[in-house]
Image (cartoon, rainbow, N blue to C red):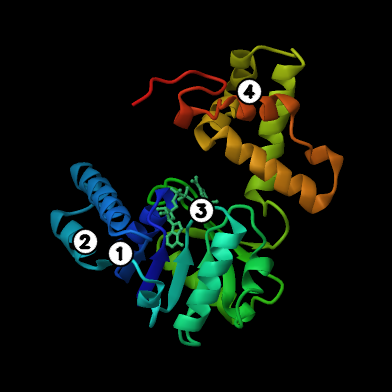
Amino acid sequence: MKMSVIGGGTMGNGIAHVFAQNGHDVTLIDVKAEYTAKALKTIEGNLARQVKKETLTEADMKATLARLSTATDLAAAKGSALVVEAVFESFPVKKEIFSTLDAACGPETILASNTSSISVTKIAATTKRADRVIGMHFMNPVPVMKLVEVICGQATSPETLACVTQISKDLGKVPVTVQDYPGFISNRVLMPMINEAVYCLMEGVAERDAIDSVMKLGMAHPMGPLALADFIGLDICLDIMNVLHDGFGDSKYRPCPLLRRMVEAGYLGRKSGRGFYEYEQK
Ligand code: NAI
């Protein structure tokens, strides 16, 4: 099947990688050729690592790369069975992309968004095919993580859900169906836990390492919540808490003032070299 992926960043290159590795012809679209070239290089590096680990043969790597093509125009998505959008987490940017894709693609095309917090219903309403718009929330790193949260918007049809569920299974993923409410399941459960860990730090309930140790050693989490927040990005954590707070209008989702303060200070976690922990800058 022909698939298209819009955005070749962290998530987009992983999604294109997984589709191509599983036999689909993939068109990877970004705004500049240098971005698609960078994405292809990342995919090549990740495939080479699989070959080194002997989880992929050299021939399969070559065949995977041969199934990938790139473009800088959304019109190149025409003829796709499925388009997965993975551009910046901004509604105005996604709105523009979905209305352009809606006009460019035939009625057979399903349009999916990898959004982690924007309403799938709201994205679908920017098109004339809301029944064929769905959320496909892959986890980072996409080639490694098994879960795909499949999000049904208000108008998503049962046929669209069945098709995307089957495609996800064929990729070797485990799709989980979720209705379109703020934060879906993943972020609705994860982010309040992280936020509560930041409250514990702010209130002096325990030191940073103690908080992370409790969750790692006591709850068998692979990473403590504060280290995980640094990994995700504190700005992203704050944005998602705001989505939950605004979406439910419930004070239990209020972002911790220390989280806000750290974001204001530019302490964004790994990507800025400093969050709850300090990191060597590459
Ligand atoms: P990123 O910043 O790494 O990549 C975004 C890419 O989209 C960039 O290459 C950019 O050039 C491209 N782009 C921007 N506007 C475009 C346009 N008009 N047309 C084509 N390409 C365009 O972002 P990332 O982290 O990959 O996130 C993408 C989406 O995935 C967001 O909606 C995010 O919420 C979601 N997500 C992110 C996860 C993560 O761990 N990074 C996990 C799950 C979902």
Of labels 1 and 3, earlier in sequence is 1
Depth check, front residue: 274 or 136: 274
Identify the image quadrant of residue 37: bottom left
**Ligand 1 has an atom within 8 Å of the beta carbon of the residue at disc 4:** no
Q: Which residue is mark 2?
A: 65
**x 35%, y 75%: residue:** 76
**Ligand 1 has an atom within 8 Å of the beta carbon of the residue at disc 3:** yes
Secondary structure found at label 4: helix
Task: Point out residue 138 in the picture as x, y percentages from the top left corner.
Answer: 50, 55
Circles 1 and 2: CB atoms closer than 8 Å: yes
Depth check, front residue: 148 or 73: 73
Residue 26 to residue 239: above or below: below
Q: Which residue is mark 3?
A: 88
Question: How far apart are the alpha carbons under marks 1 and 2?
Answer: 7 Å
**Ligand 1 has an atom within 8 Å of the beta carbon of the residue at disc 2:** no
Q: What's the residue type where badge 4 is placed?
A: Gly
Please rate how many residues cluster around mark 1, counting C-alpha atoms within 10 Å: few if below 14, some from 14 to 19, many from 20.
many
